[in-house]
Amino acid sequence: MAYITLSKANSIIKAALAKGAEGGMRPLSVAVLDAGGHLKAFQKQDGSSMLRFEIAFGKAYGALAIGAGSRTVEKFAKERPHFMEGLVASSGGNVIPVAGGVLVKNAKGEVIGAVGISGDTSDNDETAAIAGVEAAGFVADGGQG
């Protein structure tokens, strides 16, 4: 089974933070999860506010939970609120239904993890996540808006 190594997880984070700096984004927090939803790596920039870990983790966790980037999770929250309430409850509150959670896929299209970013707008968080995933040589899936 393909997986994200610690080295690749750190590469994703480094590139995502670089994208944030390049775009003048507010301080970001980046969580990289493996395909089972377990934390592989996390970094929080100086100046990040509290709960950024929980939000970044929840964006990535939600993407893994439904098998699509968190733009799709956000869409479900708007179109199917009862489903989303159940998903959030059954996850122990770990799902954050907004953009910024991106699936990480290998070249075969297999999901090997997810990245969640919090700190700027959801669109900017997603942009940084995609940049990190692609810089590490993987395929990013942010979901459908």
Image (cartoon, grey):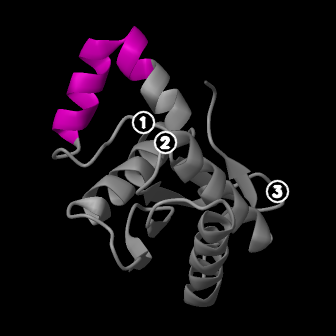
Relative depth, front residue between 35 and 98: 98
Q: Earlier in the sequence, mark 3 or mark 2?
A: 3
Question: What residue span does the magenta drawing correspond to?
Answer: 76-90
Kindly check if marks 1 and 2 are in contact, taking CB atoms under 8 A apart as contact. yes
Is 42 a magenta residue?
no
- Which residue is painted at 59% across and 51% down in the image? 103
- Which residue is painted at 38% across and 72% down in the image? 39
Looking at the image, the residue that sits furthest to the top is: 79
In percent of width and height, residue 141 lies at: 67, 45
Q: Give the CA separation, mark 1 to mark 2.
A: 7 Å
**10 Å crowding of disc 1: few (<14), some (14-19), many (20+):** many
Q: Name the residue under label 1.
A: 98
Number of the front mark, 3 or 2: 2
Quadrant the N terminus occupies: bottom right
Q: Mark 3 points at which residue?
A: 108
Could you tell whether 136 is left or right of 88 in the image? right
Number of the front mark, 1 or 3: 1
Could you tell whether 113 is left or right of 29 in the image? right
